[in-house]
Amino acid sequence: MLALALVAVPLLVLEPQGLPRLRALQKELDDVTAENDELRRDVTRLRIDVAQLRDDPAAVERIARGELGMVRKSEVVFQFAK
């Protein structure tokens, strides 16, 4: 029985479904954990942005001017050729 165990255990550990698969799964888990951490940071940043847009009119104006190119009715827009 001991001889069988001495032969079988290394074969089971070193076969593709053994130790190499365990290492691959651990690497995949580490990658997914890192991606989840990054996504959590993104969600936190986006929640802050949403709160600013709800509560801060200056933030809304900043986005309207910067991303949408909007101006106030009282402002005059000058366009220069390059």
Image: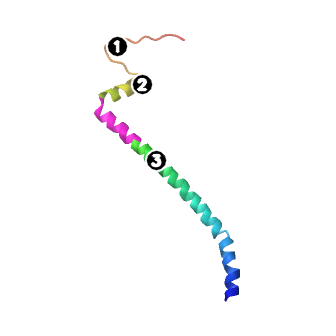
- Find residue 61 and report its horizontal and vertical position in percent: 34, 25
Q: CA distance from mark 1 to mark 3?
A: 40 Å
Q: What residue do we see at 69% from left, 82% from top?
A: 6
Residue underneath mark 3? 39
Q: Amino acid at mark 1?
A: Glu
Q: Nearer the viewer, mark 1 or mark 3?
A: 3
Report x, y in % for residue 42.
Answer: 44, 43
- State the residue lying farthest toward the bottom: 1
The residue range painted magenta reads: 45-56
Which amino acid does the dot numbered 2 rest on? Gly
Above or below, comparing residue 13 to residue 82 in the picture: below
Spatial CA distance of label 1 from label 2 is 15 Å
34 to the left or right of 51: right
If you read the primary sequence from the N terminus, does the residue marked by circle 1 or circle 3 appear first? 3
Residue 53 found in image quarter: top left
SS of the residue at dot 1? loop
Q: Dividing the image into 4 quarters, which one contains the C terminus?
A: top right
SS majority, magenta: helix
Marker disc for residue 18: none
Disc 1 target residue: 75
Instruction: Look at the numbered disc 2 and give the secondary structure of its residue.
Output: helix
Q: Looking at the image, how many numbered discs can be counted on the residues?
A: 3
The amino acid marked with disc number 3 is Leu
Q: CA distance from mark 2 to mark 3?
A: 26 Å
Residue 19: percent from left, percent from top: 64, 68
Q: Which residue is mark 2?
A: 66
Q: Residue at x 55, y 54 (%)?
A: 31
**Mark 2 or 3, nearer chain start:** 3
Q: Secondary structure at mark 3?
A: helix
Residue at left 42%, top 24%? 66
Residues tagged 1 and 2 counted as in contact (Cβ below 8 A): no
